[in-house]
Image: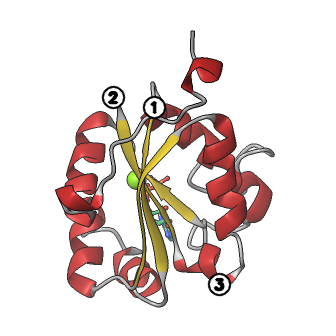
Amino acid sequence: MERTFLAIKPDGVQRGLVGEIIGRFETKGFTLVGLKFMTVSRELAETHYGVHRERPFFPGLVDFITSGPVVAMVWEGDGVIASARKIIGATNPLNSEPGTIRGDFAVNVGRNIIHGSDAPETALEEIALWFKQEELVSWQPQIMPWLRE
Ligand code: IDP
Ligand code: MG
């Protein structure tokens, strides 16, 4: 079953949006399989955002992600990687559609509330980077017959 890595960034936590954000993926019908509340080390932040290392916003991004607690999560479901990106919305919240998380709650690209893996390869890499295998819980929600035929 497909899995993706999502993280509520320090701004989402500070603004009291944890329950609202988790609720959106929960009520959509995806399955939570990993969850932890944590402070991010510089090493983890730099590895996670390594693809952006040469970009001018990289130092500020690492400072921001390490500035307060984050909620790291793994969610499971058919098509969850692409669907979660849609639920999250465009990178710049001013371009994110209303109804998306960034579209509803953010106004600035440097404070866009939530991260989501962008492809199957990055999802695998990010899940392995943020979670140990034993921290992930495989389970079958009893409502599954009401979610998929
Ligand atoms: P994504 O989070 O939608 O996948 P990416 O392009 O992968 O967007 O960028 C990673 C993160 O870097 C963004 O979510 C945002 O927090 C930050 N970021 C991207 N572009 C800028 C920028 O131009 N200024 C400040 N921060 C940026
Ligand atoms: Mg990205």
The x and y percentages for residue 108 are: 66, 69
> In terms of sequence position, does the residue under pointer 3 or pointer 2 come before the other?
2
Q: Name the residue furthest top.
A: 149
Q: Residue at x 21, y 69 (%)?
A: 47
Q: Amino acid at mark 1?
A: Gly
Circle 3 residue: 14
The residue to which callout 1 is attached is 77
Can the viewer see residue 89? no
The residue tagged 2 is: 1
| Element under disc 2 | loop
Q: CA distance from mark 3 to mark 2?
A: 32 Å
C-alpha distance separating marks 2 and 1: 6 Å
The kind of secondary structure element at disc 1 is loop
Q: From the viewer's perspective, is residue 57 above or below residue 145?
A: below
In the rendered structure, which amino acid carries the disc numbered 2? Met
Assess whether mark 1 and mark 2 are in contact (beta carbons under 8 angstroms).
Answer: yes
State left or right for residue 86 relative to residue 116.
Answer: right
The answer to which quarter of the image holds residue 149 is top right
Q: Earlier in the sequence, mark 3 or mark 1?
A: 3
Q: Residue at x 50, y 41 (%)?
A: 31
Task: Tell me if label 3 and label 2 are in contact, CB under 8 Å.
Answer: no
Circle 3 SS class? helix
